[in-house]
Image (spheres, grey):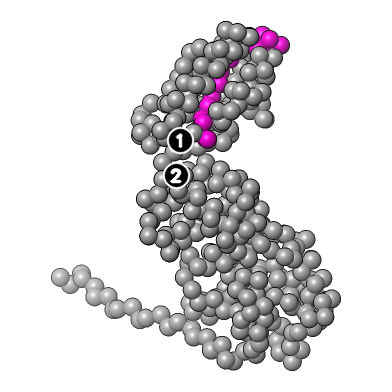
């Protein structure tokens, strides 16, 4: 056994400690948590190299606006940033306030004073120190970014990403008797919306539907909906991979619906539908005009009914097909075929390309 090498046990990594008492102290009003103890932390002790977890990009106009406020406001830095000590790097990470930290670095680099900063100390920033868990951190990041002033409010993508993260961290299990995974789709919608109303009111009203549509359409497993919905782009990409006619992505118009393409001497028209109300709206008229003007041989509708439910999807599909057939019979022959994307768990578990395919 001479070839056996005994490995020495690894020495424990020594984690750096932070004594907050070494920093100047004060109290400031935080828009997220109200008035609290803050510390003047040197910029050199802050790691600002990471990406803002609540934003998809840096918004330079917001940095410029904050810089103007810092140097002209008689109170200087009005709101603290939030930092978290990283014992592994011996630096503070930014929880929120990236734009403010960048604006302060710019002020110092230009020799511009900030009223309530300490001239005898190294360049720094007033901050409060976060000590909670991952879900709590995501919650305050959402609140701060979703209700931001001054600066630019978070975007739909920003808030969607943060809500997904919060759900994934178990945030919407906290304080509830019923776990998120046990809720119906409608109950998940209601719980998420109530959370957004409380935490980021700006995004808990009419704008919440846009957030929900985005996180429920991207297949994120943390949301775990029993009924899957799709964007028209999702439908188009899938149809191009699973249609029997050889229609490809490059054949489609940039706005997708109303595409007319000729394959093997057959002229096809294609419309993409995500709501059961479209058959009673502009769809029949637009399809009829397209059929007539372009001399289409075969008109196709590719559909998901995102505003349906597991229990009603079968009935809603038949109702839409019936309306299309009645339009064909009574007004103008505009529809030839409907492809239905799988939306229920049972349909998604099937090996079939389509949940239903109907010739009209």
Q: Quadrant of residue 349?
A: top left
Residue 300 vs residue 105: left or right? Answer: left
> Would residue 300 be counted in the magenta stretch?
yes
Q: Is residue 38 above or below residue 69?
A: below
Q: Are marks 2 and 1 in contact (CB under 8 Å)?
A: yes
Which residue lies at the image location 78% right of the left edge and 61% below the top edge? Answer: 61
Q: Which residue is mark 1?
A: 309
First-in-chain label (2 vs 1): 2
Residue 301 at what x, y percent from top left? Answer: 55, 21
> For this view, does 212 lie left or right of residue 70?
left
Give left or right: position of 112 versus 341.
right
Q: Residue at x 65, y 90 (%)?
A: 24
Near mark 2 (Cα within 10 A), the count class, few <14, some 14-19 or many ≥20, is many
Above or below 19: residue 58: above
Specify the segment rendered in magenta.
290-307
Residue 12 or 269: which is nearer the viewer? 269
- Residue 340 visible? The answer is no
The one nearer the camera, 158 or 2, is: 158
Residue at image location 66% in from the left, 53% down from the top: 155
Q: Which residue is mark 2?
A: 185
Question: Residue 1: which quarter of the image?
Answer: bottom left
User: Residue 357: x and y, percent?
Assistant: 45, 19
Query: Is residue 175 found left or right of 35 in the rendered image?
Result: left
Q: Nearer the viewer, residue 232 or 245?
A: 232
Q: Nearer the viewer, residue 92 or 37?
A: 37
Q: Residues within 10 Å of mark 1 (few under 14, many from 20)?
A: some
**Where 318 falls versus 144 (above or below)?**
above
Horizontal and vertical percent position of residue 143: 60, 64
Instruction: Give the residue furthest to the right.
Output: 72
Query: SS class of the residue under badge 1?
Result: loop
Instruction: Using the rendered image of the protein, determine whether residue 314 is visible from the camera's viewpoint.
Output: yes
């Amino acid at each position: 056994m001479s070839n056996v090498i005994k490995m020495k046990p690894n020495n424990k990594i020594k984690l750096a400690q932070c004594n907050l008492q070494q920093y100047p102290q004060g109290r400031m009003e935080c828009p997220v948590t109200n008035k609290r103890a803050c510390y003047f932390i040197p910029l050199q002790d802050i790691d600002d190299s990471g990406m803002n977890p609540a934003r998809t990009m840096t918004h330079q106009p917001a940095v410029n606006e904050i810089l103007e406020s810092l140097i002209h406001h008689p109170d200087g830095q009005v709101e603290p940033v939030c930092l978290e000590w990283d014992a592994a790097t011996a630096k503070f990470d930014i929880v929120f306030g990236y734009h403010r930290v960048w604006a302060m670095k710019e002020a110092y680099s230009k020799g511009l004073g900030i009223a309530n900063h300490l001239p005898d100390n190294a360049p720094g920033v007033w901050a409060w120190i976060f000590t909670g868990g991952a879900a709590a951190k995501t919650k305050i990041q959402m609140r701060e970014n979703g209700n931001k002033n001054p600066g630019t409010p978070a975007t739909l993508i920003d808030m969607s990403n943060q809500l997904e993260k919060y759900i994934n961290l178990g945030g919407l299990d906290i304080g509830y008797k019923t776990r998120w995974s046990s809720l119906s789709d409608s109950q998940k919608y209601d719980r998420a919306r109530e959370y957004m109303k409380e935490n980021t009111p700006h995004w808990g009203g009419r704008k919440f539907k846009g957030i929900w549509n985005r996180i429920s359409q991207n297949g994120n497993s943390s949301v775990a909906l029993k009924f899957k919905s799709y964007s028209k782009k999702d439908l188009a990409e899938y149809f191009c991979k699973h249609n029997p006619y050889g229609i490809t992505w490059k054949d489609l118009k940039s706005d997708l619906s109303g595409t007319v393409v000729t394959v093997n001497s057959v002229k096809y028209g294609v419309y993409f539908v995500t709501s059961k109300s479209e058959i009673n709206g502009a769809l029949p008229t637009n399809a009829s005009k397209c059929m007539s003007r372009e001399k289409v041989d075969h008109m196709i509708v590719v559909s998901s009914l995102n505003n349906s439910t597991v229990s009603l999807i079968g009935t809603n599909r038949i109702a839409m097909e019936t309306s299309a057939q009645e339009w064909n019979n009574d007004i103008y022959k505009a529809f030839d075929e409907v492809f239905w994307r799988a939306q229920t768990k049972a349909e998604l578990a099937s090996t079939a390309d389509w949940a239903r395919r109907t010739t009209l």
